[in-house]
Amino acid sequence: PAGTESRLVQFTELVATAIANAESRAGLARLAEEQAALRRVATLVAHGASPEDVFAAVTEEVGRLLSVDIAALGRYESGGTLTFLAVWGSAAQRFPVGSRWSLWPGVGTGRAQRSRRGARRQARTHQPRRPRHHAAH
């Protein structure tokens, strides 16, 4: 029928506008979640929480914001090891706070240490051999 093409163009523009509006609302909701997480951590700091409590809170907030199964905060030590300062999520018991682990070049912590940037790894379908655990000092 006459005008079908122009009505399709109008409909397509309307759909594009609706998608853009939905993405904008999702972005604003995400920003609000991030700001709330920052406020919670800042409140802990302002009330004089211990470094351990602040590390734990930051790690939990990051894990929740990124929707991941595990989040960890660690300190790189001499000798190619990592000491866990805070761990949150499903595998937290496997990596106790204070435990020390050898770094592997291909594993996220090894890549992060080399690049001096954060690293994220997707879940694996098989379990690789774990890095060697060192007794906490």
Image (cartoon, rainbow, N blue to C red):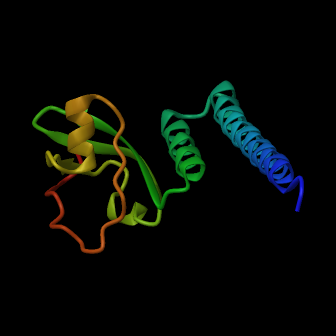
Q: Position of residue 44 (x, y in %)?
A: 66, 34
The single residue placed furthest to the left in the displayed view is 79
Q: Nearer the viewer, residue 124 or 7?
A: 7
The single residue placed furthest to the right in the displayed view is 2
The single residue placed furthest to the front in the displayed view is 2
Q: Nearer the viewer, residue 5 or 11?
A: 5
Quadrant placement of the N terminus: bottom right
Q: Position of residue 64 (x, y in %)?
A: 59, 52
Residue beneath the point at 39% across and 65% down = 93
**How many numbered marks, from 0 up?**
0
Residue 37 in the image: above or below residue 115: below
Residue beneath the point at 75% across and 42% down = 20
Q: Quadrant of residue 137?
A: top left
Q: Nearer the viewer, residue 39 or 120?
A: 120
Q: Position of residue 105 (x, y in %)?
A: 14, 45
Q: Quadrant of residue 78?
A: top left
Residue beneath the point at 32% across and 48% down = 98
Q: Quadrant of residue 24?
A: top right
The single residue placed furthest to the top in the displayed view is 46
Residue 115 in the image: above or below residue 68: above
Residue beneath the point at 33% across and 31% down = 117
Q: Nearer the viewer, residue 34 or 72?
A: 34
Residue 94 in the image: above or below residue 74: below
